[in-house]
Image: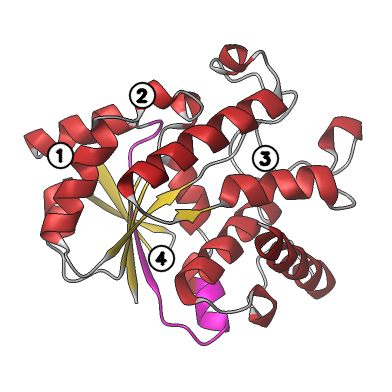
Amino acid sequence: MRSLSIGNSFSEDACAYLHQTAASAGADLECVNLYIGGCSLALHAENLRENKPDYLLEVNGKSTDRHISIPDALGMGEYDFITLQQASHFSGKPETYFPYIRELYEACRKAQPGAEILIHETWAYEHTSTHGAFPDYGCDQCVMYESLKSAYADAARVLGVRQIPVGDVVQFFREGVPGFDALHGEEALTRDGFHLSIPTGRFIAALVWFEVFTGSDARSVRFLPDGMDEEKRDFVSREVHRALGAL
């Protein structure tokens, strides 16, 4: 299988462990990510129209040091999955999604008629985040989460596509899994208030993508990220599977 993500640092987080995660469960998944930090749907659409080679090409979680355009990436062989997402700062603002996400969707559908196009639902910032866009959500993680959840769901419904619900699963951990209440001194799932923590946050995202792409059980994953022991891996895998089952 092959996936292409038209994204930014949040798709970089999600794809960092995905190839290894899938391989450890017997799935051969090549993960291609197009990276521009903080890139919004509007900028993606502009870059698409102008064929700008502004994206750092990342494959299986590693930089190739090569820059490429969206049309060029879409022409790099066949993909099974293509993912689209909004920049985190606009993720809870539905007015920022259209017409840009439809433009990207239609270009991907035309170039890759055999691929499933999905929307990657990103996550809310940490309660204590100092990100400059957090005040747009009242510096309230729950407000941001509910806003982005609604905006992504609306976009997915309009386009008729599935979501990769990383934002939902991250919030599930924060609110319902022992040990992840960062507001009260427990483990945070971000490393800087908005990017996913290493290794736990990134591993959670990889497990979500793995289940959505393959239909396999996250508990079958044997990949062990640096900095995580087997007991923690198995616990996180169980909770991701439980979270996805509850959605």
Q: Which mark is residue 48?
A: 1
* x then y, percent, for residue 91: 48, 30
Three-letter residue code for mark 2? Thr
65 in relation to 87, above or below:
below
Tag count: 4
Residue 26 lies in magenta, yes or no? yes
Q: Which residue is mark 2?
A: 96
* x then y, percent, for residue 59: 35, 62
Q: Which mark is residue 60?
A: 4
* Chain-order first, disc 4 or disc 3: 4
- Name the residue at 24% across, 30% down: 99
Front disc: 4 or 2: 2
| Residue furthest out toward the bottom | 26
Separation (CA) of disc 1 from disc 4: 23 Å
Badge 4 vs badge 3, beta-carbon distance below 8 Å = no
- The local secondary structure at tag 2 comes to helix
- Return the residue nearer the eye: 78 or 116: 116
Write down the region rendered in magenta: 20-38
- Return the residue nearer the eye: 6 or 114: 114
Three-letter residue code for mark 4? Asn
How packed mark 2 is, by other alpha carbons closer than 10 Å (few <14, some 14-19, many 20 or more), is some
Looking at the figure, which quarter contains the N terminus? bottom left
* Chain-order first, disc 3 or disc 1: 1
Front disc: 1 or 4: 1
- Return the residue nearer the eye: 63 or 181: 181
Q: Which residue is mark 3?
A: 190
